[in-house]
Amino acid sequence: MDKIEIYTSKKKSVFMLLGALVFVVLGIWLFLDAEHLTGWPARNPLITQGVGIASVLFFGCCALVAVKRVIKTKLALTLDPKGLGFYANKPAPLLLEWKDILGFDEVRIQSQKFLVIMVTEPNFWIEKETSFFRRKLMQLNLKNYGSPFNTAAAGLDISHEELTGKLNSYLEEYGSGAHQPV
């Protein structure tokens, strides 16, 4: 099998941008109109304004990320005979070799499907991570899902089913043989 490169999706990024802009506008409206709103949380205009500011800040950041993704698609994952490469916000990709991958598990959070990548030595990967924030996120993933790694097709230019199929095919072809297809 050849190398497969999976990029972020411009179409999904446009939807993310539109959704974020809606929440930015709602946040501005909450902030400016806090005195005139009735009901929760408007009993206290300061709380309503705080919710508005939080909405503008959070979804404003989401909008910036979406604009960046709309302007330029980014390589997110690679699959090749060596392993599964992650390109998320790192100067160099993280390569999980197929021999280190035990299999994949599927988790659904709300309506979003995630693929949990089960690895042989999860603590090795956590200790190897240099970013404090990513390390804590990996520890949380390990505690909740049994692995520090997961991925979703939500922002990628591939469907969940296609991603699952390709990952299982590559693992079957190049893995150690002790895998569990999803």
Image: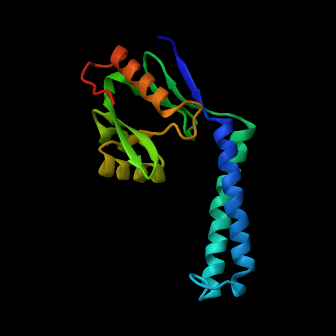
User: Residue at position x 28%, y 19% from top?
Assistant: 176
Q: Is residue 6 above or below residue 37?
A: above
Q: Can residue 136 be seen in this view?
A: yes
User: Residue at position x 32%, y 27% from top?
Assistant: 181
What is the x, y in percent for residue 62? 64, 54
From this viewpoint, which residue is outermost toward the left? 178
What is the x, y in percent for residue 15? 67, 46
Q: Which image quarter is the C terminus in?
A: top left
The answer to which image quadrant residue 100 occupies is top left
Q: Is residue 124 above or below residue 57?
A: above
What is the x, y in percent for residue 158? 55, 30
Closer-to-camera residue (103/83): 103
User: Residue at position x 36%, y 21% from top?
Assistant: 171
From this viewpoint, which residue is outermost toward the top? 1
User: Residue at position x 39%, y 19% from top?
Assistant: 169
Closer-to-camera residue (7/158): 158
Q: Can residue 95 be seen in this view?
A: no
Number of marks present in the image shown: 0
The answer to which image quadrant residue 104 occupies is top left
The answer to which image quadrant residue 165 occupies is top left
User: Which color scheme is applied?
Assistant: rainbow
What is the x, y in percent for residue 92? 55, 32
Q: Is residue 109 above or below residue 149?
A: below
Question: In this rendering, would 144 be left or right of 46?
Answer: left
Question: In this rendering, would 86 be left or right of 121?
Answer: right
